[in-house]
């Protein structure tokens, strides 16, 4: 242990003439005085020594730089104390302050920064708190600038794919822009899967990639790839910055593009020479941004909204079909209000789950390939379909010729190219969900019939009949743990307060069917690309965004191995995530298709030679638990979730033969669902 | 149906490849594509010719508009417009064919812009169909090489496809 040194005064000079070290006295407020000329004093960063389980002290930079005025100004003890609140469980052995002494400058003076410093400062000015990244040659200048600051928290992942997924999870859970930083060549290509995943689900993200120095571009230089070319088809936009003077503006544009309109990932490729620490230029972060070529629509056209409300007032069998756009556009409150005002049933896509409370009676379940009987039958019979922030994906529509054969369709979407892409619509409305829904509600309230429920009462009778079929029922007396039961137990144990991320496969569908979400941004998964390996790193992003929240990742025995290295990241940052592995010994979703369509020829869908997940987790310093009997499950889960500060890996051995039902087979319509074998044909008729 | 679409793009390095990439990634037809900077050097103007049914062309236009570099777009085929394409044809021009070739060039208002003992280069500008007709009219076997710019177009009338 290092003794707390005596109070000291900072004197100009420091490491490189700009910094000075000083140690405040533990009992009293420190007072900074500087020798020589008057200067501005900035508390630059705190260095904390955090003891790891191995006994090693780790240096961490925790606090934001803050200007504390001219020399002689007191340093508040609070400036140092709040470090422990950032890292719960960490304690300081000793602390030191590093102060930057900059020459006194008149107010409004322009600072001079290098490209690397501009990257960091622009992110700070953008309000970014966390960057997920992995260093390498072409981003070393940026990493050095990162080291010298205290505002941005950098999370070191163990694979660049995970950096992108974690940024995606962070963005999904908060609505803010996710940020990642990777090196050129393999760093960038490793991130591509994560970028494509975010692109398909319209997740706001800015990805900074290093590039070889500009004079080397095109020469097949070491770790050179055409990042802009490789990522072009899976980003909303991308940039190659060739001049340090364009850096700040490009970063501003990237955030603007990523977060407005239909959100999406934006890549900024930054050659190493652009971040040269020796070339400093005046830095001003542009506040305003106007792009003549990019002007996303906000408000919906009043005439179109009026037409939509007309249709809604006439409707006998209306359905709200809501999607990820309601979550992305924070339109949950408006949707809920409109749904309650109209009394219409609500169904949601996989990506929209939680935007309307799933435990509400008006919610009739997810629709589509593995949607509920009542939701899909309602789609087939509806006369007015109100699609909101949903993109008529093929998993949702089934065979287009059979899609909503009786309906007139209203479609609200911020992206004109989503409208009438797969299905013709009668009333297109381009605009932000929240604004359009608020306008719709106002108009509907003005003109609504005296007893709102009356016109759709008959429709509800019909829907409740379909509901009576209980399409999700499964064998509750099974001696093996049924995956559905595992999900139900997870819901029970966490009281509906969970943030749940998912990998891809049967477990994902079971989670969507059996875990109701009553709030948006709680259910976080890869829908569009269906990327196995997404769940664990996404959960890291969620946990970092909400340190106090309960975060779990539901996964499969095949998916989890695709980003298993992140167990190390979870250990380093003490992320108390709970992994719930539905271990069926198969790529269950693949096995199901092979059983149904390939006469049970299980070609390479068996996950042979699985590791011992308990030991594996333990070797990373986590808690591992294996659960094999239904009667043990609830207690085990309670025990796991009671460990609020530990990462727990629950290896739940489930029935390997279980399939996901209902299911719409390829080429079939919504009314031609296949129910689980526990439903006899008689019930269907 | 054939559509000729004019697009004003930011004159940025990657803009052209974004358009080309869009067409190949989404499997749209592209018959020709021409692009050059405009009088405003920050803008390029692209003319592209594509075919497809109404729904596909509608999607193409939406997708083009969605590109962050796209400033403005106009489907020229929706209104009355003028199209011009430039072509250069290198032909074998031995003594016995020279007169015939010159006469043809005159009829089509084409110009002979390069002459050697054995060849001509004939330059011609016009609607694409007219260029096709000229090629058909050239005597069998004389064509050495044909190079065409692809059509560019402009709407008739006083209104222009400009920033304001
Ligand atoms: C194994 C597997 C099985 C699946 N099975 C199903 C299934 O049974 N049912 C199902 O539904 N899905 C299923 N999916 C998911 C499916 O592939 C699609 O990802 C999903 O259906 C798309 O959801 P969405 O239509 O809500 O669109 P999203 O991808 O969420 O797109 C959002 C839409 O909203 C728009 N938008 C975005 N922001 C705004 C805003 N602010 N205002 C207005 N509009 C906005 C966007 O332009 C876009 O059109 C499955 C996926 C996997 C991997
Ligand atoms: C990266 C990637 N590769 C392949 C697939 C195809 N795929 C979809 S589900 C699945 C099996 C998933 O198995 P597991 O994680 O064990 O989940 P289960 O279906 O058994 O619940 C596969 C291989 C995919 N979605 N992503
Ligand atoms: Mg499995």
Image (spheres, coloured by chain):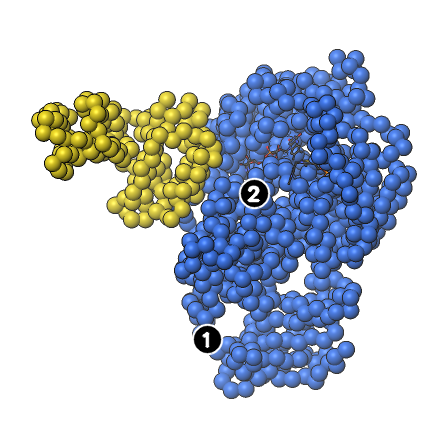
Chain colours: A blue, B yellow
The circle drawn on residue A459 is none
Residue at the image position 45 percent from the left and 60 percent from the top: A213
Split into 4 quadrants, where in the image is the C terminus of chain A?
top right
Q: Residues within 10 Å of mark 2 (few under 14, many from 20)?
A: many
Question: In this figure, what is the number of numbered marks?
Answer: 2
**Numbered tag placed on residue A196 in the rendering:** 2
Q: Is residue B64 left or right of residue A535?
A: left
Does A325 sit above or below residue A398?
A: below
Q: Position of residue A161 (x, y in %)?
A: 61, 49
Ranked by sequence position, the earlier of labels 2 and 1 is 1
Which residue lies at the image location 56% right of the left edge and 36% below the top edge? Answer: A433
Please indicate, yes or no, whether residue A419 appears anywhere in the rendered image: yes
Indicate the secondary structure of the residue bearing disc 1: loop
- Above or below, A54 against A579 in this view is below
The chain carrying label 1 is A
Q: Which residue is pictured at 88% across the width and 44% down the height? A: A635
Q: Which residue is mark 1?
A: A105
Q: Quadrant of residue B20?
A: top left
Q: Chain of mark 2?
A: A
Alpha carbons under labels 2 and 1: distance apart: 46 Å
Q: Nearer the viewer, residue A299 or A87?
A: A87
Crowdedness near tag 1: few (<14), some (14–19) or many (≥20) residues, C-alpha within 10 Å: few
Q: Is mark 1 within 8 Å of ligand 1?
A: no
Q: For the residue with label 2, is its CB less than 8 Å from the closest atom of ligand 2?
A: no
Query: Are the residues at dot 2 and dot 1 in contact (C-beta closer than 8 Å)?
Result: no
Looking at the picture, how far across and down is residue A666, in whole percent? 63, 22
- Same subunit under labels 2 and 1? yes
| Residue B117, position as x, y percentages in the image | 11, 36
Q: Nearer the viewer, residue B120 or A251?
A: B120
> Residue A187 location, x and y as percent?
56, 54
């Amino acid at each position: 242990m290092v003794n707390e040194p005596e109070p000291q005064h900072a004197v100009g000079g420091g490491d490189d003439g700009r910094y000075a070290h000083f140690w405040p006295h533990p009992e009293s407020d420190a007072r900074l005085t500087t020798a020589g000329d008057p200067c501005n004093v900035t508390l630059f960063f705190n260095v904390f020594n955090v003891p790891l389980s191995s006994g090693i002290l780790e240096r961490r930079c925790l606090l934001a730089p803050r200007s504390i005025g001219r020399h002689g100004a007191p340093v508040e003890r609070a400036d140092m104390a709040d470090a422990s609140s950032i890292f719960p469980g960490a304690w300081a052995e000793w602390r030191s302050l590093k102060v930057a002494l900059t020459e006194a400058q008149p107010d409004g003076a322009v600072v001079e920064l290098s490209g690397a410093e501009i990257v960091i400062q622009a992110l700070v000015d953008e309000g970014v708190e966390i960057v997920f990244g992995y260093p390498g040659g072409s981003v070393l200048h940026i990493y050095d600038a990162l080291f010298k600051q205290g505002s941005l928290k950098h999370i070191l992942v163990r694979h660049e794919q995970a950096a992108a997924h974690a940024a995606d999870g962070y963005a999904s859970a908060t609505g803010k822009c996710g940020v990642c930083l990777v090196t050129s060549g393999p760093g960038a290509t490793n991130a591509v899967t994560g970028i494509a995943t975010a692109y398909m689900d319209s997740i706001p993200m800015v990805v900074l990639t290093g590039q070889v120095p500009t004079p080397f571009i095109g020469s097949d230089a070491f770790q050179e790839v055409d990042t802009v070319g490789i990522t072009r088809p899976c980003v909303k936009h991308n940039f190659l910055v060739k001049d340090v003077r364009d850096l700040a503006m490009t970063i501003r544009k990237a955030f603007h593009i990523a977060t407005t309109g239909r959100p999406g990932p934006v890549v900024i490729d930054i050659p190493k020479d652009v971040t040269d620490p020796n070339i400093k230029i005046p830095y001003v972060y542009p506040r305003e941004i106007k792009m003549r070529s990019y002007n996303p629509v906000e408000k919906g056209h009043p005439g179109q909204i009026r037409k939509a409300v007309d249709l809604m007032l006439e409707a006998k069998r209306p359905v709200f079909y809501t999607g990820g756009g309601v979550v992305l556009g924070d339109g949950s409150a408006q949707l809920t209000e409109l749904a309650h005002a109209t009394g219409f049933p609500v169904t949601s896509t996989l990506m929209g789950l939680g935007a309307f409370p799933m435990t509400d009676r008006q919610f009739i379940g997810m629709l589509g390939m593995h949607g509920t009987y009542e939701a899909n039958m309602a789609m087939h019979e509806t006369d007015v379909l109100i699609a909101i922030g949903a993109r008529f994906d093929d998993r949702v529509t089934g065979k287009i010729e059979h899609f909503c054969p009786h309906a007139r369709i209203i479609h609200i979407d911020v992206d004109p190219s989503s409208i009438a892409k797969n299905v013709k619509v009668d009333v297109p409305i381009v605009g932000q969900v929240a604004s359009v829904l608020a306008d719709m509600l106002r108009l509907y309230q003005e003109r609504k019939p005296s007893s709102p429920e009356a016109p759709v009462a008959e429709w509800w009778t019909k829907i409740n009949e379909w509901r009576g079929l209980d399409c999700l029922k499964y064998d509750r007396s099974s001696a093996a743990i049924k995956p559905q039961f595992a999900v139900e137990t997870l819901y029970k144990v966490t009281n509906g307060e969970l943030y749940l991320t998912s990998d891809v496969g049967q477990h994902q569908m079971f989670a969507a069917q059996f875990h109701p979400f009553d709030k948006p941004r709680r259910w976080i998964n890869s829908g569009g690309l269906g990327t196995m390996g997404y769940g664990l790193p996404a959960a890291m992003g969620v946990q970092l965004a909400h340190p106090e929240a309960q975060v779990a990742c539901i996964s499969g025995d095949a998916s989890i191995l695709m980003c298993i290295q992140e167990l190390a990241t979870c250990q380093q940052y003490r992320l108390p995530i709970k992994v719930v592995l539905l271990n069926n010994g198969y790529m269950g979703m693949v096995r199901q298709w092979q059983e149904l369509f390939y006469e049970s020829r299980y070609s390479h869908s068996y996950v042979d030679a699985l590791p011992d997940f308990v030991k594996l987790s333990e070797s990373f310093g986590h808690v591992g638990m294996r659960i094999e009997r239904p009667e043990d499950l609830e207690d085990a889960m309670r025990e796991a979730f009671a460990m609020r500060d530990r990462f727990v890996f629950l290896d739940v051995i489930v029935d390997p033969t279980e399939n996901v039902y209902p299911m719409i087979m390829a080429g079939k319509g919504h009314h031609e669902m296949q129910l689980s074998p526990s439903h006899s044909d008689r019930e269907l008729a | 149906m054939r559509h000729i679409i004019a697009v004003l793009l930011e004159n940025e390095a990657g803009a052209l490849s974004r358009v080309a990439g869009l067409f190949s990634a989404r499997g749209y037809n592209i018959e020709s594509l021409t692009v050059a900077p405009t009088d405003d050097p920050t803008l390029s103007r692209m003319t592209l010719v594509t075919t497809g049914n109404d729904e596909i062309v509608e999607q193409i236009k939406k997708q083009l508009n969605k590109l962050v570099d796209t400033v403005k777009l106009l489907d020229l085929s929706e209104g009355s417009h003028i199209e011009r394409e430039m072509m250069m044809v290198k032909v074998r021009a031995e003594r016995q064919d020279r007169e015939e070739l010159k006469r043809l060039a005159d009829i089509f208002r084409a110009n002979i812009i390069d002459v050697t003992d054995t060849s001509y280069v004939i330059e011609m500008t016009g609607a694409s169909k007219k260029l096709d007709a000229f090629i058909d009219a050239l005597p069998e076997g004389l064509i050495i090489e044909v190079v065409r710019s692809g059509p560019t177009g402009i709407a008739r009338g006083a209104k222009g496809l400009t920033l304001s």
